[in-house]
Amino acid sequence: MTFRPTLVALGLGLVATAATVTAQSNNQGGATAGDAERGARLAYTCHGCHGIPNYRNAYPGYKVPKLVGQQAPYLEAALRAYATGERSHPTMFSQSESLSDQDRADIAAYLESGGVPQDRPVVGTPPPATQTCVACHGDNGAKAVMGDYPVLAGQHQDYLEHALRDYKSGRRKNPIMAGIVAAIDDKDIPAIAAFFANQPGLCGMEDLRKHGACKK
Ligand code: HEC
Ligand code: HEC
C-alpha cells in the first residue's frame, strides 16, 4: 500500500480546492460544499437519465448509475474526468464539458445532500473477494474513507460490474483500482457487485426530487 500518502495528499488537495471555491462564491465560510440550491437548478437536465428509475445506457447495456449520496469531491472528480476525456463516455462528455469548477461544486453539493446511511448492519455474507474493498469503501460500501472515493452501497449491480470490467480492461484508468481489479478473478465480479448493490445506500435523483433524500 505504498500509494497511500500520495492519495491522502490528493484528497486533501481536492478538499482545499472545494473550500476555496465555496468561500469565494458564498459567504458561509468554512464549509467545503458548493451551493446546493444553485446545483439543483443546474442539475435539471441530469434528471432525464439519472432521475428515471432503472434507465439504461445503450451499447453496452447497463443501468445509469445512481448519484445521490455520493460524496461531493468524488462527484466533482468524476465530472472533471468526463470533461477532460480522461474518463471516456460521449453522453457524459457533452453533459460536463461546459461546466465550470463552481458549477461542478454546486451540482455535487446538491447530489451529496441526499445522504447515505453509513451505520447500517451489513446485509448478507460478504464474498471473500470483498475483504480488500472495505479498507477504502467501508464495511458495507457505504462509508468511503476519503471524499474522492465512491460509495458503492446500493449502486446498480450491472453498473458496478461494468465499472470493474472497465478498470480491468484499462478503458477506465485509475492507478488504485487498476491494481485492485488485477487481483480479482473475472468470475467473482458478479458476486462482488451483487453484495454492494444489496446494501442500503445510494439512490436515484427521483428520490431527491420527491423526498429531499434517499429513503431511509
Ligand atoms: C443521456 C443520459 C445522461 C444524462 C442526461 C446525464 N448522465 Fe451522467 N451518466 C450517464 C451514464 C450512462 C453514466 C455512466 C457512464 C460510464 O460508464 O462511465 C453516467 C455517469 C455519471 C457520473 C459518474 C457516476 C459514478 O458513479 O462514477 C456522474 C457524476 C454523472 N453521470 C453526473 C451527471 C450530471 C451532473 C448530469 C447533468 C449535468 C448528468 N450526469 C447527465 C448518463 C447520463
Ligand atoms: C486503496 C483504496 C481502494 C480499495 C482497496 C478499493 N477501491 Fe474501489 N475505488 C477507489 C477509488 C479511489 C475509486 C475512484 C477511482 C476513479 O475515480 O475512477 C474507486 C472506484 C471504484 C468503483 C467505481 C465506482 C463508480 O461509482 O463508478 C468500483 C465499482 C470499485 N471501486 C469497487 C471496488 C471493489 C469491488 C474493491 C475490492 C475488490 C475496491 N473497489 C477496492 C479506491 C479503492
Image: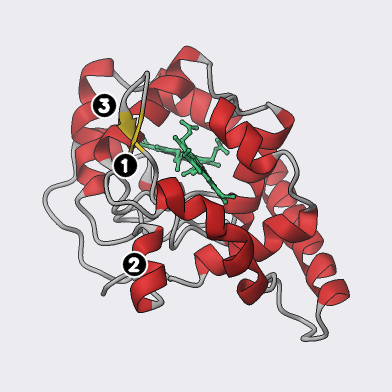
Pointer 1 residue = 55
Badge 2: residue crowd in 10 Å (few <14, some 14–19, many ≥20): some
The extreme top residue here reads: 169
Observer-side mark, 1 or 3, equals 1
Q: Quadrant of residue 55?
A: top left
Q: Is residue 137 visible?
A: no
Mark 3 element type: helix
In the image, what residue type sits under mark 3?
Ile
In the foreground, 58 or 14 = 58
Q: Secondary structure at mark 2?
A: helix
Q: Position of residue 15 (x, y in %)?
A: 72, 61
Instruction: Say what amino acid the circle numbered 1 marks.
Output: Tyr
At 67% from the left and 27% from the top, the residue drawn is 86
- Amino acid type at image mark 2: Asp
Residue lying farthest left? 124
User: Percent position (x, y) of residue 161?
Assistant: 31, 29
Residue at horizontal 88 percent and vertical 73 percent from the top = 24
**Which of the image's four quarters has the C terminus?**
bottom left
Disc 2 versus disc 3: nearer the observer: 2
- Asked if disc 1 is less than 8 Å from ligand 1, the answer is yes
Report the residue marked by disc 2: 207
Q: Which mark is residue 189?
A: 3
For the residue pair 68 and 99, the one nearer the viewer reads as 99
- Measured Cα–Cα span from mark 2 to mark 1: 14 Å
